[in-house]
Image (cartoon, helix red, strand yellow):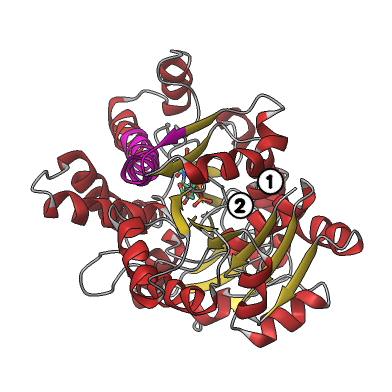
Amino acid sequence: MKKVCMVGTGYVGLVSGACFAHLGHTVICVDNNAARIENLKKGIMPIYEKDLKEMVEACVKKENISFTTDLCGAVEKSEIIFITVGTPSDKKTGDADLSFVFAVAADIAKHMKDEYKVIVLKSTVPVGTAEAVEDIIKKAKPAAKFSVVSNPEFLREGFAVSDFLNPDRIVVGANDAKPLSVMRELYKPLTDKGFALLTTNTTTANMIKYASNSFLAMKIMFINEISDMCEKAGADVTDVAKGVGLDSRIGHKFLNPGPGYGGSCFPKDTMALERMAKKFDSPLKLVETTIAENNARRFKMLSKISNALGGNMRGKRLAVLGVTFKAETDDMRDSPSIGILSELHLNGAALDIYDPQGKKHGPEFFPYAKFHDSAAEALSGADAALVLTEWPEFNKITAAEYKKLLKTPLVIDLRNMYKLEDMKGVVYHSLGRKTVK
Ligand code: UDX
């Protein structure tokens, strides 16, 4: 089994660290945020992710995961060092901001001694980053023996643990053969179960990650456009998606219309790929359009809401169900709800929000709204319900309950949570389907 160090205990670092430990490796998780490390030692997770807490607790008991702020000790003890710090979008340019990755690389170099180390980039990084990290380490420690590997993650929030342990594929990009045997041993518990490991060079590995996320973002925006057309043409987008998805070349996943994609990956990665492509003088028109349409989506949703409310939002009280960018997460990053609700507020609507996890970060995004502890509380006496996130518990709310709780029986559902035939008795607006009255 391998000795592994994860630098950065954010989403990717913590989930990957816990999963490697679960697979039997010895993992040291390092972060320069001392409060976060202290919390992790006490079993307090910085994020909400299904099964993560239980997995970390079990690995702590078995003593194959530990948490520290001491990078030096962690680097010395580990053969494989993962860089799992953030690569946010540069606010001005949209490029991936690599300053955290480079700073960590320089820090790691300081603590490298004679043993060979594999430095792994797991954060989503543009083409050329592995080479840049190699240069940083070489400059700081010319005698250091190491290889830099690109090993992108494909973890969905809410399913990250399960995605890690049941991957569609593991991608390892390296520019020489030496680190590949180390990485194969690291992933052996998964490849032994039959999961595929694809080896490429580092540039190709980076491209696989960006192309995958951009393709999925494009697929979502495609069904959103088809949904808009269905609404006008009188077709039903649920059946269209079913019929299209049955074609095995297309597949049924990621064909759910919604208020646009959000989260920590798709908006950032599509933008970074667009920028990168321009630098290579190879513009990606489909990705450019996907980004533009996703930005415009929020305004389309706003006019849908406004029309449903009879063109006037002033003085209307809306019960908002869900604000996180998707269900099963407390993450608010780039959530479509941010743009939609701020416009509703500016147009004079009063907002009563319920989200099973949104209370943690929600209030900082929506200081003007009131947060409630249950859907029933938010719905009570409101002029309309607005469903923004597909939390499974919203599925259980019946038309009769909406009718009983709302002042006027109007439901605007931007996630197509309900079957049309189940919504008789309320005015029900959804995406790409006829309005039920
Ligand atoms: C994504 C990728 O799926 C994962 O492989 C990657 O490495 C990280 O980014 P995540 O951001 O957790 O994962 O969310 P995902 O489930 O992919 O959804 C992204 C966005 O698309 C959400 O806003 C979601 O609501 C939206 N979406 C997704 C739709 O609107 N319709 C769909 O059919 C699917």
> How crowded is the residue under tag 1: few (<14 C-alpha within 10 Å), some, or many (20+)?
few
> How crowded is the residue under tag 2: few (<14 C-alpha within 10 Å), some, or many (20+)?
some
Name the residue tied to disc 1.
Answer: 392
Residue at x 58%, y 75% (from the top left corner) = 361
The spot of residue 424 in percent (x, y) is: 60, 35
Q: Is residue 245 above or below residue 36?
A: above
Q: Is mark 2 within 8 Å of ligand 1?
A: no
Label at residue 210: none
The spot of residue 182 in percent (x, y) is: 59, 45
Residue at x 78%, y 50% (from the top left corner) = 22
The spot of residue 37 in percent (x, y) is: 70, 79
Name the foreground residue: 294 vs 55: 55
Label at residue 327: 2
Q: Which residues are magenta?
A: 199-223
Q: Nearer the viewer, mark 2 or mark 1?
A: 2
Name the foreground residue: 12 vs 361: 12
Residue 307 vs residue 7: left or right? left
Separation of marks 2 and 1 at Cα, in angstroms: 8 Å
Residue at x 39%, y 34% (from the top left corner) = 432
Q: Earlier in the sequence, mark 2 or mark 1?
A: 2
Label 2, secondary structure: give it.
loop
Name the foreground residue: 180 vs 35: 180
Name the foreground residue: 21 vs 77: 77
Labelled pair 2, 1 in contact (Cβ < 8 Å):
yes
Residue 222 part of the magenta-drawn span: yes
Residue at x 25%, y 65% (from the top left corner) = 94
Q: Is residue 341 above or below residue 271?
A: below
